[in-house]
Image (cartoon, rainbow, N blue to C red):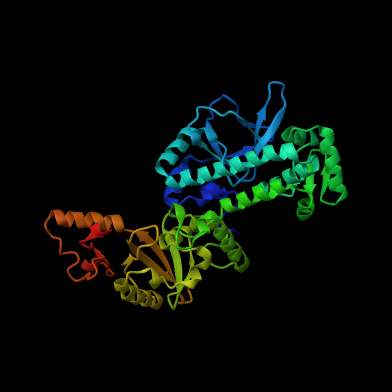
Amino acid sequence: MNMVSQDSARANRVLGALPMVDYLPMVSQLEAVQLQPGQILEEPGAPASHVHFPISCAITLVSATRDGEMSELALIGREGLVGLPALLGAPSSAVQAVVLRPGLAYRLPAAAFVQVLQRSAAMQALALRHVQSLMVQMAQGVVCSLHHSVLQRLSTWLLFHHTVTDSDQVRATHETIAHMLGVRRESITQAAGQLQSAGCISTSRGRIHIHDAQGLRAHVCECYALVEQDHRLLWQLPQQDEGSAPLGMGPWSHADVERAADHEEDSGDGPASGRYADIYDFAPVGLLSVDAQGRLMETNMAAAIQLGISRSQCHLYRFVDFLQPESRQAFEQFHREVLSGKCRRHCELGLLPGAHRPAAVVRLDATVDENGEENRMVMVDVTESHRQMAQLLHAHGRDGVASADVPSPDGMPWWGSGAGPAATAPARMSSF
């Protein structure tokens, strides 16, 4: 079972790329809906009540004349969202959003989406990336309609539909596609016949089956490569530089999650497999495990974000690599106690600052696996509680009490373990 369920809201790439701190507050307002072909989500001039995040459906944005003639402007699948007015602050849409391929989507009230935008820089960045992708589609579509043949345009449209929906089946009649591309139905029928003769597709009533996507590439114009490249780069941006992670996500992306999911599906191991995969994967606390030598074996999303690593490469690190030097010995002792089965305490340690996060204090609770070889830990950020304790001690004139036996020669706070004085509150939390 994939860690990101195909029916999960996080299967939408905008929602899937959101940091958990931004995603979790909106979960209660997300509503799963089954969209039907031809269903209109947005009407020109009318305010939209919801923003939709496609999962298995495809939405087309079309512009129509007074005579009923229409042309497709862009196609949206699980990589994006439908709700430009709410995103751009417009009272209504100038185009129509119509369901082309039926399927699952999650919707969020437009007013709630505006609130998410106001508090989440990550959502702003992801949504605006999607807007850029739509602009590329629209601009290239204008060029394509003026300079390329119907055969090239149909091949491009089919391939892009294949990319967006990840499906070999297109549910659309020749007449519908003709409306989308702004050409005569007879021209689509003729071009489809050529593609069918070449073995690329087959047609049945209201459906087109893509048998040879690579073969279709021989018939497309250069517009497809340009749109495809932009579509691909849209979700590679967070990984361009492993040393810098935009949106506070750490150097991981939706692709990392899918690769990790494929690995676990093959192996069938790990606490993230089985029916509780989503609970493990999207838990609001860090879940991770290390082997007897302290090497990371796996992490959930929250832990990967806290550590600033790609989940698919976690095995390259030891957990102590992320700790303040003065916390490493405390963890080693805690780790030995956990593996011995005699640990009856928690451990609070200092994390090193990352490229996009400050230093932090984390609390570890742990248990050993049935073989005594794996330390499975829950990691909770308790930085704020330490900060508040330090402020309280300062207010009572007790700055040195909580960390009297925890020296900090470099001015950076770090922590011991257990429930003793060293774990309660570093006095110099202002250095965060």
The x and y percentages for residue 128 are 51, 43
Residue at position x 49%, y 58% in the image: 280
Q: Is residue 101 visible?
A: no
Residue depicted at x 53% and y 36%: 51
Task: Give the side of residue 379 with respect to residue 198, left or right.
Answer: left
Which residue appears farthest toward the top when viewing the image? 66
Q: Is residue 419 above or below residue 11?
A: below
Q: Residue at x 68, y 24 (%)?
A: 65
Which image quadrant for residue 334? bottom left
Q: Residue furthest left?
A: 397
Residue 415 in the image, given as x and y percentages of width and height = 27, 67
Q: Nearer the viewer, residue 386 or 185?
A: 185
Q: Quadrant of the N terminus?
A: bottom right
Q: Quadrant of residue 407?
A: bottom left
* Above or below 206: residue 167: below
Q: Quadrant of residue 306?
A: bottom left
Picture coordinates of residue 342, whole percent (x, y): 35, 75
